[in-house]
Image (cartoon, rainbow, N blue to C red):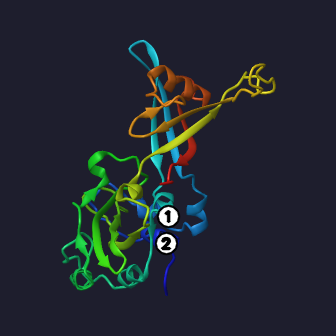
Amino acid sequence: MKLTLDQTIAAMLTENTGKHFLDSGGENGRAWQRNIGKTLDDFRAMPSATAEIYVREYGGETVAEIIPCVNVFHLLTGGALELDDLCQEFNAMPVDDWKGDFYGVSMAGAEWLEARGFEESGETFNTYNWNSKHSQILQGTELTRDSEWGEEKYLLLQIHGGADVRGGYTDAKLFKLDDRAEYYNAITEDCGFSAELTGIDTETKDMFNGTRRDNYTHIAWHGEWINAHGSCADDSELLAFATACGASLENPSVTIAGDAYLDF
């Protein structure tokens, strides 16, 4: 049975990647265990991005820390990846060992890839190595293949479902990149958030241009926080945003939903 892209990613997120009594996952603390029981509708209903907001005193001042997180289900089903017939065939193969040339690939899988002209085109990556802002760690290898339409781009991808980063990865699955996408589109961390401001008159029109004032404030994550004017957000702007979200010294921890930027 051919799986859709959504079904493939959901299956990876719930794949039992094992446990070990020496890892830090305890009884049920591994990512795959937290995802067990979730349906496709559950994954789809999750926000594509969240931000954890913390307010505290530091050096005699009130400061805010905002930590973004892009949901990997939405990231990987957002349009950069697709499944063609080659992906479907590879992904349906049993994985009896991890003795292939790529992480999470069996010897038979590696021979299948070679026989069909797949070649490694970039270094294997692990998003843990740059402290990515994803809900789960991703590990993958960029591949290319020559076809009658020219060079086509593919991605071998594993999702970390365990506790400690050194183990607990899914079997690798093969995905084709959309013709308009680049590899980084499949692992982007870009996202944005809004908060409603109180005490703003949104009804009175500007006497010069006839527009009404916006009562929302916005920040976006592009490797650093960017304010609504397109500049780097400073500490005072982050604190103002945190305050607008309801965080304070009395309520020091807030989580809000936002949007992953998945267009390309």
Q: In the image, is 22 to the left or to the right of 226?
A: left
Give the camera-side residue of 70 and 211: 211
Give the camera-side residue of 93 and 192: 192
Vertical placement of residue 182 versus 212, above or below? below
Q: CA distance from mark 2 to mark 1?
A: 7 Å
Q: Which of the 4 image quadrants contains residue 142? A: bottom left
Are discs 2 and 1 less than 8 Å apart at CB? yes
Vertical placement of residue 51 versus 151, above or below? above
Residue 225, given in percent of the width and then of the height, sits at 44, 33
Q: Which residue is mark 2?
A: 5
In what element is the residue under mark 1?
loop
Identity of the residue drawn at 36% across and 55% down: 184
Q: Identity of the amino acid at label 1?
A: Thr
Name the disc covering residue 35, or none: none
Residue 113, given in percent of the width and then of the height, sits at 26, 80
Name of the residue lying farthest toward the top: 60
Q: Which residue is mark 1?
A: 77
Q: Which of the 4 image quadrants contains residue 90? A: bottom left
Q: Identity of the amino acid at label 2?
A: Leu
In what element is the residue under mark 2?
helix
